Image (cartoon, rainbow, N blue to C red):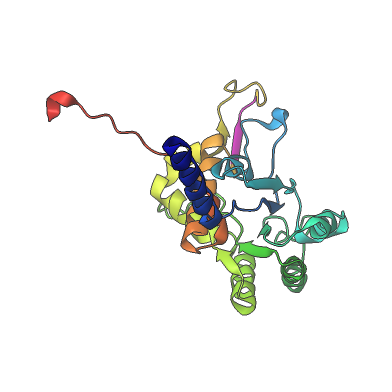
Amino acid sequence: MSHRILTAVAAVGLLALLAFAAPPAAGIKVYLIGDSTMSNKEEKAFPETGWGMPFRYFFDETVTVDNRAQNGRSTKSFLAENRWQPVANDLKPGDYVFIQFGHNDEVPTKANYTPEADFRANLLRFVLETRAKKATPVLLTPVARRKFDAAGKIEETHAVYATIVRSLAQEQKVALIDLDAESQALLQQFGVENSKLLFNHLAPGEHPNYPAGRDDNTHFSELGARKMAQLVLADIRTLKLELANRIVKREVKKTVDAQAR
């Protein structure tokens, strides 16, 4: 009889604890919209890697990263090709949209060139339509190209368009990840030669996809994509976005040498 009473008390206690436990976090989507520096790559392009590819592995099972970035796209072409509207239609409260353009918008010789005023207006549209769905926009300045001067100092290649992103973020009170400045600092840290490891630099015959080799200072290697994704991840934490609570937490097991005690 006493055993039954103890069992019943234990069950009631467990139910009480469960009642006060925090409910599991609702599932959300993190949409990535942008250009080739962020996009998923086809096998024929490997080892070229967009930073959005490793980015998706940083989060727990409550987060789905939906990478809609596309090679060669500007804000103008992303809208003209109806790539934005399906994202806007599907957004749910609690979702995120990470917005990174500029590489193609800023080049007047490209078909996808977007004048400065239009670039700003397009970014503003992404922000306002994201907020209208009670989702969170995050603006990112365009990630740096690998370009050093004769003295080995990294050069700014996105000055005008990165400034537009920064000013819009400040004006609209949008979370900003200054990937231009942060990636420049990373490239400077690596230096002129070692920074090649972060980009799709290949010697002739080094990879079957590029038999003649490759000398690409815009698109990343697998290592470079991971380093850029880690910069974004660090900013998610610094900005204290709710998304930071969904980053995978893994315990690091330490091996203690008994003889060293």
Q: What residue is drawn where x is 56% and y is 35%? A: 222
* Residue 173, above or below 111: below
Residue 216 location (% of width, % of height): 60, 40
Magenta portion: prevailing SS class: strand
Image quadrant in which the C terminus is located = top left
Outermost residue to the bottom = 171
**213 in the magenta segment:** yes
Residue 240 location (% of width, % of height): 50, 63
* Residue 84, above or below 50: below
**144 in the magenta segment:** no
Front residue of 144/58: it is: 58
Image check: 252 left or right of 66?
left
Count every numbered label the image shows and give the total: 0
Residue 15 location (% of width, % of height): 54, 49
Q: What residue is drawn where x is 13% and y is 24%? A: 259
Asked whether the viewer can see residue 129, the reply is: yes
Q: What residue is drawn where x is 55% and y is 51%? A: 246
Write the start and end of the magenta stretch as one range: 212-216
Q: What residue is drawn where x is 70% and y is 50%? A: 35
Residue 215 location (% of width, % of height): 59, 37
Asked whether the viewer can see residue 100, the reply is: no
Image check: 154 left or right of 75?
left
Front residue of 17/121: it is: 17
